[in-house]
Amino acid sequence: MTFLFDYIREGGFAMYVMLLIALVTHPLAIGAVVTTFGSRRGLTLALGVTTLVLAGLLVGSGVLGYVLGMRNVDEAVRFADPEFAAALRAQGAEEADNNLYFAVILGAFPLLAGSIALLRGLRMKPPPTTP
């Protein structure tokens, strides 16, 4: 369990943002999958699109965390002793990579569930219109 806390702490602020987004995205993804078994086209489409948008935001947060982390690494290496620059860059890149891995881990299920719901909603017949 300590490993997970260290992993998140090393990744930086974006890791906490991804966790907060995942608290919303994962229940929505479950709801999106459940609605695919029903016959309510509008609800299925809405949950599919919402889940995909939030999953994209989650993955985008991971990419942003990586970019900001690498920017901080470059800044630190610029002032470091050249003897330690390579080791410092490697350690910083490893910590910044945590953001990308975490984004993939947290974003995979909502992206898949949202895609399934969206495709299922598009394939459902629209409700009949009354004259």
Image (spheres, rainbow, N blue to C red):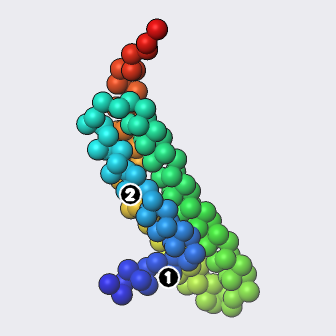
Number of disc labels: 2
Relative to the observer, which residue lies in front, 97 or 50?
50
Residue occupied by mark 1: 9
| Element at label 2 | helix
| Element at label 1 | helix
> Callout 1, which amino acid?
Arg
Earlier sequence position, callout 1 versus callout 2: 1
Q: Which mark is residue 69?
A: none
Taking the image as shown, residue 73 lies to the left or right of residue 48, namely right
Depth-wise, is mark 1 or mark 2 nearer the camera?
Answer: 2
Give the quarter of the image for residue 65. Answer: bottom right
> Callout 2, which amino acid?
His
Residue occupied by mark 2: 26
Give the quarter of the image for residue 92. Answer: bottom right
Question: At which x and y percent is residue 76?
Answer: 68, 83
Question: At which x and y percent is residue 38?
Answer: 28, 35
